[in-house]
Every structure is written in C-alpha cells, then in structure tokens.
Image (cartoon, helix red, strand yellow):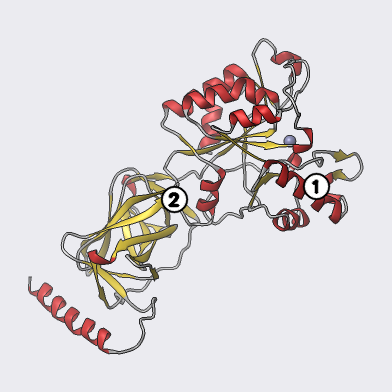
Amino acid sequence: MRKWLVLAAMFVFLSLGWTNSGRAAQVDSFAVAAKEAGAPVYAWMAGRLENVGKLDRGEAFEVVGEDEQHYVISFGFVSGMVKKTDVTKVRPSAGKRAPNKWRRSVITLQDAEVYVFDRGAKQAIGMIRSGVRYPVKAETRLYYLIEIGGRDGYVYKHVTENDYGVPVLLYHHILDDFDEPFFRSTTTVPFSQFAREMTYLKENGYTAITPEALLAYVRKEQLLPPKSVLITFDDGLKSTYIYAYPLLKRYGFPATVFMITGRMRPAPQPFDPRGLQFLSKQEIAEMRDVISFESHTNHFHLSDRQYGPYLLFKPYEEAMADLKASKEKIGATAIAYPFGAYNGRAVQMVKQAGFVMAFTTKKGTVYPGDSPFELKRQWVYPHISLKQFERLLRP
Ligand SMILES: [Zn+2]
C-alpha cells in the first residue's frame, strides 16, 4: 500500500514535469497508463476491430502513434489501440528490452496474463486475449518472453500453442472419382478427396480468408483468426465451377481462382472429363459471390523447352504487356506465377504491372513480414490422406 502511494506521488510529479515541458508532444516520447479497471486493447483482425487484450491499471506502455480517439501501442505483430478516455499520459517505464532472438510465434489458447518480475515478485501488467497470434522473443522453462507496448513481459507457455502460420492451399483440377482416372496427374484431385478436405476445415472451425486479408496480415496491418486458411485454384478450369463452387458456397468459404485470362471462354463450354475446359465469363460472373478471380498471366502460362517458363526469359515489353492485359481483363490485384516459376525480374515486373501480391508454389505457410511477392502455398496432391492434409495445415 505504501509502495503504491509512493508510486502515485512519483506519477503526479513526473506527469506534471512532462506537461510543463512546453514542447510539442513527440509521439514516441511518452507512455500511457490505464485508469480504473484497465484499458481494453483493440486491433484489426480480418477486417473487424476486435478486443485483443487489456492493459492493467497504472502500468506504463509506450505510445507509438495516435488518432483522434486512440493511442497506438505495439501489440505483437500489429498495432494495438486504446481509447484515449481509458488512459492517462505518463512517463515511459525505464525497463530494458531484451533483443528478439527468435522468429517464431504462438497463439493464445485462453486469455493470457502478461507478467513482469520485479525483485522476485511476479506482477501482471496486462493480458492478451484468447486466439491472438503473438511473436515470442525467448523462452524460459515455464514462460515465453513477449513484448507489449514497448515492455518485456512473460506469458505462461501452457496457455499457448505453436503458431504454424497461415496455410494457402493450392488446387487445380477436380474430377468425380469415377472420371478421375481419365485425367490422372499431380493436379487432378478426386472430388471425394476435395469434399473430405473442405468438410474437415468446416468441422474443425477454420475460417477461409481472402487474399486481401492475407496481405494485410503479411504487412502486419491486421491479425487473422487462429484457424485461417486461403483456398486457391490455379488455371481457371471448368471443374472449379462444377465441383468446387457449390461446396464452397454451401460451407460459406470464400476462395480464389488464378485465371489464365487468355484462355477464358466467351461462352460456357460443355463439360468433358477427358479433356480440360476453361471457365467462361458467364460462369465467372456467377461465382463472384464466393470466388475472387486473380491473375495467372494472360498468355504466359507456357514454357519453352530450352529457356523454361515464359515469364522468366521473354522480353520485358512483351512480358509487361501480358501481365497488364491479364490484370485488366479480370480486375486482378494478385497473381500466381505460372508453374510457380519466378526470379528477381519477375518480381519486379509484377510489381510494376500494379499487382500488390504474388503467389508461388514454394512449400510452407505464411507469416507476418513475409514478402508479399513470394507467398508460399501448400500444394494439395491427389490421393493424400486426411492425416497428410492436416500436416499441410499445420506443417
Ligand atoms: Zn498453372
């Protein structure tokens, strides 16, 4: 109690000192502390402002920005916002911050208190809500070391699980199991398998996200729910319309198709499982309620026997014209490199053509800070088991 009074007195003294300094508020030179019951922290999660944590009363957190109604503090991967009316300005706490040694993150399984240790005493300074992805800097036997509002703090390991990153699933062709032997390849998934996998996602509480939500996540502008997945299809085949679309619609899963726009048909083609048919404008328009359409180049889904994929070696002007044509035709902001092939020049070109993100076929999941132009995807091979599918989601 006495300690409290001393702190409170210091507080008043220090904050008076601060307000009397007369200089314009340097946004990085002050901290805030919650009044009364603590201050909720808000952050954007897939397009919605969510309550992601809490600052305990009286604890100082460094301010890194502000808008009319909020102060902004660092909150793991993203910016956390606290209402100005919930806090008062104070001097920053003097604690030193540990360097970030790890490149890994966790997801909170329940509301997780954040502790500091002061001369052997453990004290909570705030809380991270359940279902938030958070980077960790180091670990002890019992705790992960994290940073919140410019302060180091500890959370119990057992209230978190490993963050396996966000999987971007890659499909191409789907055929009925009866038809599938006609067109057996690494890109044709039997419908029973696809249906089993979508049902797995549904039953296990996955949220299907859009490329825009993934981009905001990669840029550390927004969080994503714990079980997020981006479902993608390459090439723009008619089987997407026949098999994938009805199921995705039923489950409420948005998905993305990367179109080879030069192969788009003016009118729907009859479906023939012995060959490949491409989507028509009419089918595309019909599917827009569930599926977003992005680019897979216009006529550059070709490979030269000697020089390899077109995007890697064709003259700059020709390649740019193809990228721009494709982008315009389908109204795309994202692209998938044909055959997953890209190099430094390809990255530069897709940027210059106005794309904001590009997908590869490199294996792995996506984390904040990844390059938006080298996004990894998990290729869903035909005839894999549900166990193998699970491993694509949580590698
Ligand atoms: Zn392709």
Q: Mark 1 points at which residue?
A: 322
Amino acid type, mark 2: Leu
Task: Name the quadrant where ligand 1 sits.
Answer: top right
Q: Where is residue 7 in the image (x, y as percent from the top left)?
A: 16, 76
In this rendering, the answer to whether 248 lies above or below 143 is above
Q: Can residue 142 be seen in this view?
A: no
Q: Position of residue 217 (x, y in %)?
A: 50, 51
Question: Secondary structure beneath disc 2?
Answer: loop
Do residues under tags 1 and 2 come within 8 Å of each other at their CB atoms? Answer: no
Q: In which quarter of the image is residue 159?
A: top left
Q: Please name the residue shown 34% across and 53% down the image.
A: 141
Separation of residues labelled 1 and 2 (CA atoms): 34 Å
Structural crowding at the residue carrying mark 2, measured as other residues with C-alpha within 10 Å and reported as few (<14), some (14–19) or many (≥20): many
Amino acid type, mark 1: Asp
In this rendering, the answer to whether 394 lies above or below 83 is above
Kindly identify which numbered label has been placed on residue 223: 2
- Left or right of 315 in this view: 281: left
Q: Please name the residue shown 72% across and 53% down the image.
A: 350
Q: Which of marks 1 and 2 is in front?
A: 1
Q: Can residue 162 be seen in this view?
A: yes
Q: Position of residue 225 (x, y in %)?
A: 42, 43
Q: Please name the residue shown 69% across and 55% down the image.
A: 354
- Quadrant of the rendering where the N terminus is positioned: bottom left
Query: Which residue extends farthest right?
Result: 306
- Left or right of 343 in this view: 228: left
